[in-house]
Amino acid sequence: MKQAILVTGATGNVGQYVVKYLEERGEAVVVAGSKLDELQRRFPTAARHVELDFENPDTYEAALDGVDRVFLMRPPQIGDADVFVPFIEAMAERSIRLVAFLSLMGVETNPFPPHYKIEKYIEQSGVPSVHIRPGFFMQNVTGVHAEEIRQDDEIFIPAGNSQVSFIDAEDIGKAIAYVLADPESHRNTAYTLTGPEALDYVDIANQLTILTGRRITYAKPSMLRYRSHYIQERGLDPAYVNVTMALYLMTRLGTAKAVTDDFERLTGEKPRSFAEFARDHVDAFQR
């Protein structure tokens, strides 16, 4: 009987595309998340739909039943890496051929984000693994940070003057599908996935200015001003905001500007540019 691939965070920016490209390759996919009805609506052709809560080990058995490969992602609201230890141990007790963990570009030399410890926990467990370390998602600009662009004509991100090799989440999902479909070739490896160029946030603001016909500027807030705005005014979870601050601190240190060819080597295709992505998602920036 054909074994299935478990996709955690299936409705997320990356997970939805992991499912899409795995199904295109004829793989049986078990989609996991917190809302069963949404999973069934979004993925009607999935092999199974399961509720998975990393903080509830009682949900592990159903999620891992009949599975031999796993796409693992950290839900944004969970900032404590230790939460994932029981699930990693559950994978180690089964014949998992490969776990593809959605990590973070440059995290191998930065122990502050939770991704660093999760990578180490997976490696220590003995489960064959591949760490997928993407640059910043283009969807960050159309998602959580789009509100200030729409309302205030500014990009409100504390990245200083740093450059970022943005990548489309769809490209990340596509690359992960290639990896999971050929698990033996990617055991105990890591790939850094980036877009085709490194841009600073002034570059992004200029591209959005041309695209929208409005003058978009880069606010370049301090870390404290950013934290206050997103917690006090936007009402976001402080734990989530703290994790994003750690990521933007990494960016300020220059860890997000490298451009690699890992995506092209895995897929045989060129990654999408930010200009192409923004044109296709211009509605996200309109008032």
Image (tube, rainbow, N blue to C red):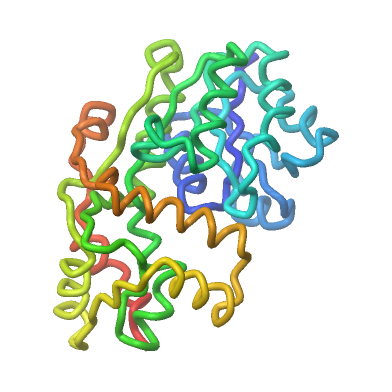
Q: Is residue 263 or residue 204 the one in the foreground?
A: 204
In the picture shown, does residue 219 fall above or below 134? below
Does residue 166 sit above or below 284 in this rendering? above
- In which quadrant will I find the C terminus? bottom left
Residue 122 rendering spot, x and y as whole percentages: 57, 22
Residue at screen point 71% across, 26% down: 64
Does 145 sit left or right of 213 as displayed? right
| Residue 68 falls in image quadrant | top right
Percent coordinates x, y for residue 102 in the rendering: 47, 37
| Vertical order, 94 against 197 (above or below) | above
Locate residue 24, reporting x and y percent: 43, 36
- Front-most of 280 and 72? 72
- Residue at 66 percent across and 25 percent down: it is 88
Q: Quadrant of residue 135?
A: top left
Count of number-bearing discs:
0
In the figure, is residue 152 to the left or right of 260? right
Residue that lies at the very extreme toward the right in this rendered image: 58
Q: Which residue is drawn at 19% across and 77% down?
A: 211
At a point 57% along the width and 52% down the height, the residue shown is: 76
Q: Where is residue 282 in the image (x, y as percent from the top left)?
A: 29, 74
Q: Which of 177 and 28 is in front in this view?
A: 177
Q: Quadrant of the N terminus?
A: top right
Q: Tell whether 5 sits left or right of 189.
A: right
